[in-house]
Amino acid sequence: GNPSRKQVRVWCDGCYDMVHFGHANSLRQAKAMGDYLIVGVHTDEEITKHKGPPVFTEKERYKMVRAIKWVDEVIEGAPYVTTLETLDKYDCDFCVHGDDITMTADGVDTYHIVKAAKRYKECRRTEGVSTTDLVGRMLLMTRQHQQVGEAEYLVERGHSDSLGTDASARSPWTGVTQFLPTTQKIIQFSSGLTPKPGDRIVYVAGAFDLFHVGHLDFLEKARQQGDFLVVGLHTDPVVNQYKGANYPIMNLHERVLSVLACKYVSEVVIGAPYSVTSDLMDQLKVDLVCHGMTEIMPDADESDPYTEPKSRGKFLQLDSGNDMTTQRIVERIIEHRLDY
Ligand code: CTP
Ligand code: C5P
């Protein structure tokens, strides 16, 4: 580009509670409107005051936003109403927000000031995903789970046959999903990178359902083991087989986007085999396969999914130092269900 041109600095702010690919997609669009993206994240206290307590703590929310690949800087504890003082303080030209209205507890548009000053731009909200929707899926899931009990497993398995081929990507677990996955969205989220000669390639596989801080800490550690990190995502029926109940909560397409939005991830295998095969390791030229400290569930034939990398001396168990799990998120939601 032209070195004399002034860098355009863009401001975004929000709660970013249960960060999902809708948030990531808004930050992607915002970044494309300028050169440098600063994201202000509200404190727990501020969010509680205006719309009730968040599911994730501010520390967790700051970390999640910082890991989104289009974000250059996070400002902790940004005020709920965006002011010109805030934009000026961080030398931002304008503020970007989705095309939905956000209000304070008193019913004031949180962007009225920047709108009036013409320092406001809109990005398109991603249809079919929101924190409210995800919480709804989790509450629905527990209700169905309690009602149907043992029988539900068979129901799920039956439905699961159509997963991955159905364009609407509906599943009994993610039943309310309205999100339409397109190749365009995958391209927009993809890094487009290929490994450079000599790059050390690290492979990890999992469900990565409701992409959370535990996953993030794990991927950061895995990335530190090499130069190019490939994440294999299991299909919905496979995840259901080893996680049980109504998991996964996000379908494969949604999980792909969540993982691609993470700055540590170089490439994603969409629907990776549960066991890490010799073909997969050769094709991707994998130097190291990692798994966290969480339990390694056996494959359908009871075998260890990491037999191949272990026999090659290319397996490493990593401690993410974080005990967050998808299950714990669901438990947090249920504990606080009266607040939502
Ligand atoms: N956003 C989006 N698409 C979504 C959800 C959120 O583009 N499906 C955008 C919002 O428009 C906003 C930014 O993400 O610009 C941060 O939003 P936040 O204050 O966290 O969000 P909510 O709108 O409350 O998001 P959610 O309903 O998921 O909580
Ligand atoms: O459970 P899931 O398949 O989503 O986990 C993906 C990977 O992330 C696994 O290797 C798991 O051990 C790791 N992980 C972790 N720390 C957490 C949660 C998951 O290391 N808190």
Image (tube, rainbow, N blue to C red):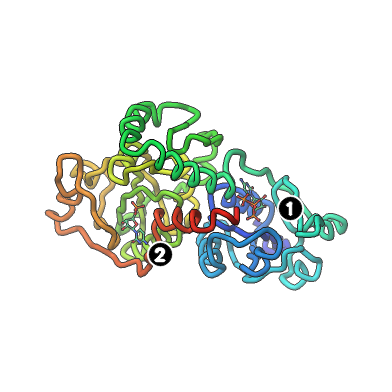
Q: Nearer the viewer, mark 2 or mark 1?
A: 1
Seen in the picture, residue 182 relative to 82 is either above or below; the reply is above
Residue drawn at (59%, 58%) of the image: 16
| The one of 206 and 36 positioned closer to us in this rendering | 206
Compared with 89, 141 (above or below) is above
Q: Is label 2 in contact with label 1 (beta carbons under 8 Å)?
A: no
Outermost residue to the right:
116
Q: Residues within 10 Å of mark 1 (few under 14, many from 20)?
A: some
User: Does residue 214 appear to the left or right of 86 in the view shown?
Assistant: left
**Residue toward you, 46 or 66:** 46
- Is disc 1's CB within 8 Å of ligand 1? yes
Locate residue 272: give its quadrant. Answer: top left
Instruction: Kindly tell me whether mark 2's CB lies below 8 Å from ligand 2.
Output: yes
Q: Residue placed at 35% from the left, 60% from the top?
A: 227
Q: Which residue is mark 1?
A: 102
- How far apart are the alpha carbons under marks 2 and 1? 31 Å
Q: Dot 2 corresponds to which residue?
A: 217
| Amino acid at the residue labelled 2 | Asp
Q: Say above or below: 231 vs 81.
A: above
Disc 2 element = helix
Q: Nearer the viewer, residue 294 or 244?
A: 244
| Left or right: where 279 falls relative to 73 | left
Pick the front one: 174 or 144: 144
Q: Residue at point 65% right, 60% down?
A: 52
Q: Position of residue 117 (x, y in %)?
A: 86, 59
**Label 1: which secondary element:** loop
